[in-house]
Amino acid sequence: MEFNGTFEITDSGIDEVWDGLSDPAVIERALPGCVFLVEVDDDAEVNFRELADRESDGEPDDADRPSFEEGKSYAALVQVNVGAVTPRFETVVTIDKREFPEMEASGEGKSGSSSFEMASGMTLTETDTGVTVDWWSSADVFGRIAQMGQRLLNPAANKIVQRFFTQIQTEIARENERSDDSQVESRTTEADEQSTAEADGGLTGRFQSFVSRDGK
């Protein structure tokens, strides 16, 4: 199956969109049905049950999660809705290319008797109103899910993509708000510290003046 399309993310710069699409924590929150998305060792067999237990023990510290890196592999547990079937795929994806403003990935996933192999990529272009994301994806599906045919698979895939990019825009806007709030808080703190220093300096000056007069 082949998919491609264009999505525009408005009111954001290309660097902000690139950072968002390169952030595993943002992708985890934006991807419909994603239970977790974590970096894994390329050479080790992925234990999805162990990863699921570890992730369920507590919220991961997003600040400790570095951006996607070219050549690195990532494990994701993703539940998809295809008609009345909701398989949960154990997926491993490798970042094959990450050169601004382009990124490509490939991987495979399995759920019971169903499995798939995929490759995908995207290119960012800045516009007057935001950023255009040109994306493509190809997938080969096998087993039970393949028996459903493209009549069910194509609409399901397109729905996932649409929801993903819509949520990406929301996540990027939220990150921008956090950044703005942090800058405002920083400026407020600096202003308070300066005011305190000036007040302390004035008090010190008055005290020294009083001591000088008292000593005469």
Image: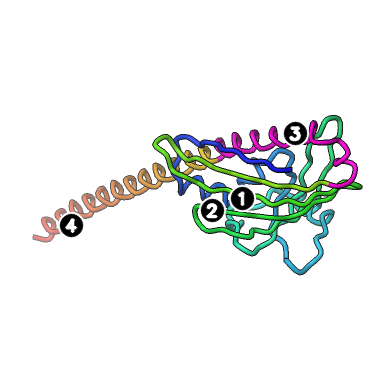
Looking at the rendered structure, the secondary structure element under dot 4 is: helix
The label shown at residue 207 is none
Q: Label 3 to label 1, Cα distance in Å?
A: 19 Å
Question: Seen in the image, is 11 located left or right of residue 187?
Answer: right
Q: Earlier in the sequence, mark 2 or mark 3?
A: 2
Q: Is 200 left or right of 87, judged from the image as shown?
A: left
SS assignment at label 2: strand
Q: Categorize mark 1 by other alpha carbons within 10 Å: few (<14), some (14-19), many (20+).
A: some
Task: Give the Cα distance between marks 4 and 2.
Answer: 64 Å
Q: Secondary structure at mark 3?
A: helix
Point 46% across, 46% down: residue: 14
Residue for badge 3: 156
Q: Is the C-beta separation of discs 2 and 1 under 8 Å?
A: yes
Tell me the kind of residue under disc 3. Answer: Ala
The residue under label 4 is which amino acid type?
Gln
The answer to whether residue 172 is above or below residue 105 is above
Range covered by the magenta-colored residues: 142-171
